[in-house]
Amino acid sequence: MAHHAHLSGVFAPQREEVDINDLEVDGEIPDDLHGTYLRNGPNPRFDPIGSYVYPLDGDAMVHRLEIADGAAHYRNRFVRTPMVLAEERAGHAIWSGLTDGYTPSADEVGPDLAGTFRQLPDINIVQHAGRLLAMAESDQPYRLDPAGLGTIGRDSCDGAMAVGSTAHPKIDPSTGELVLFNYLLEAPYLTWAVIGPDGTTRRPPTPVEGVDRPLMIHDMALTTRYIVLFLCPLVFDVGAMLNGGSLLQWHPESGTRIALIPRDGGSIRWVDSEPMWVWHFANAFDTDGDQASGGDTVTVDYVEWTYPGAFADMPRAASSTLVRAILDPARGTITRTVLGESVDVEFPRVDDRRLTLPHSRVATVGRSGGDTGDRDSLWFHDLQAGTETCWRPGVAIGEPIYMPGERHDYWGAFGTDPDDLTSSFYVLAAEDPAAGPLATVRMPIRVPAGLHGAWLPAGEPVEAVPPIG
Ligand SMILES: [Fe+2]
C-alpha cells in the first residue's frame, strides 16, 4: 500500500488506540488554556482493497487532546461503523473504495449489511446540544460518547439530518442554532435545515428552490441573516461514470451561482459569478447599508480555487488564495478581492466565537514548495491591520484551530515530521503566532495528517444528551 501517497508517510493510517496522560511538553502550556481539541480524518482500519480516494475514502479516527492546568492528555479511537466492526471480525478489509462500486454479499457480511457502501464519517467533528458528531460528506453523522470516544451510532439529529448533512454545518454562537445543508443526487438536489440549541429540529430538511442538477458542495457560510451556498459547477454525472469517466464533471461554462438563503425562510437571493471552486469558507457576516454605500451586503471570506483539480480528473490546480467576496443581495452583484499574498493555502479558520460576525484573524495552511509537497506552513492573516505572517515549522502541518484562553488566545495545530514521523501539537500565541510555539506537545503516537477539528472550551455542558433519532 506504500504506493499510495495518501496511505504512506505523514498520511499513513494509525492503527493503535491509546490513552496517555501527561504528555511530554517542550516549553510551557499556558496556564490560562483549558479545553479539548478534537480532530477527525481518514484512517482506514485495514489496508484498502481496490481504489482509495483521498480525502473521502477511509474509516474515521478521532484524536482528542485535553489541555488543563499546563498538562496535556491524549486519547484516540476509530469511529466504529458497522463496516469497521464487520472488518474487525474478519481481520481484513471487505468493502471496496468509493469509486469501485463493489458491495459485499450476504454470504460475506450477513443480510443487514449486504449491498451497503462503506460509511465515511471521517471529515469533521462537531459538538452541538450535547451531541458529539463525527461528520461525513453528505450523509448522516456518527454520534460518539464524549467521555470515552466510543461509537454510539448513526444519528439523524431529531430528523434535521434525516437525508444527510454537509460535514461542515455551522453553529451560530449568538442563537446556539446549528444550520446545515445537504446535497442529493436526485431532486430536489439541495436542502437546508436548522437544529435548535436544545437539539430539536427547528426546520426540517427544506428544498432549496431553483436547483436543477446534482452539484458537489463541500462547505457553507453563515451570517446572522443568511445561509451562503456557493453552487460551483462541479456536477455529479452518473452516466459519465458508467461510461468510464469521472463521477464528477467540471462545467465552467455554467459559472458559479451563489445562493443567499434567508434564515427566516424568505425567498432566496441569487448572485451569479465566474466559475470557481471552493472547498472551505473562513466566515461570513452581514453589513447594514447606509445612504452613502448603498444597500445591505454580505461579506464572505473563503479559499478560492480556479478549478477543483484532480478531483474531477483534471490537472492539479495551480494555486488557491484567500478571497473576500462582497455580495449585494438586492442587486445580485459580487466583488472579489484577494487577501494578502499567500498562495496555495487551504483550511481557513477563525475564532469560532466570531462565526456570523465580523472577524479579524484568519489562519490558513500553506505549502512552501519543499521536497515532500506536504502542507508545511501556517499563514496568519490580520484583516484589520492588513498584515499576514507565516510560520514554517519544518514539518507537515494540519488545519489550525483557534483556542481562547482566560487571559490570552492561542492557535493550535498538529504536525508530523516527515523524516522521523513523530507528531506534535503546537500552541502558538494568537498575538504573535509567527514567533513560534509557546509549547510543543510531543504526541505519544503518530497523528496522521488529517482533516478538520474542533476546540471545546472546558466546562461545555454535556449533561443534556438527546436520544438518537
Ligand atoms: Fe472540509
Image (tube, rainbow, N blue to C red):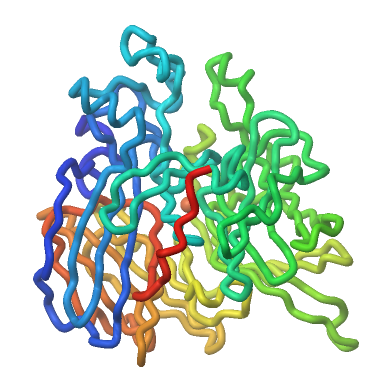
- Quadrant containing the N terminus is top left
- Residue occupying image coordinates x 53% and y 63%: 321
Give the quarter of the image for residue 409.
Answer: bottom left
- Count the labels in the image: 0
Question: Residue at (30%, 78%) from the top-left corner?
Answer: 34
Left or right of 208 on screen, residue 135 = left
Residue 419 seen in the figure: no
x and y, in percent, of residue 231 in the image? 69, 48
Q: Residue at x 56, y 57 (%)?
A: 199
Seen as rendered, the residue at the extreme top is 107
Image quadrant of residue 96?
A: top left
Report the side of 67 relative to 368 (left or right).
Answer: left
Residue at figure coordinates x 12%, y 60% from the top left: 20
Question: Which of the two residues, 258 or 286, is positioned nearer the viewer here?
Answer: 286
Q: Position of residue 238 (x, y in %)?
A: 61, 22
Height in image: 381 above or below 80? below
| Residue 434 figure quarter | bottom left
User: Left or right: 268 with respect to 224?
Assistant: right
- Is the residue 340 above or below the residue 444 in the image? below
Q: Position of residue 230 (x, y in %)?
A: 67, 53
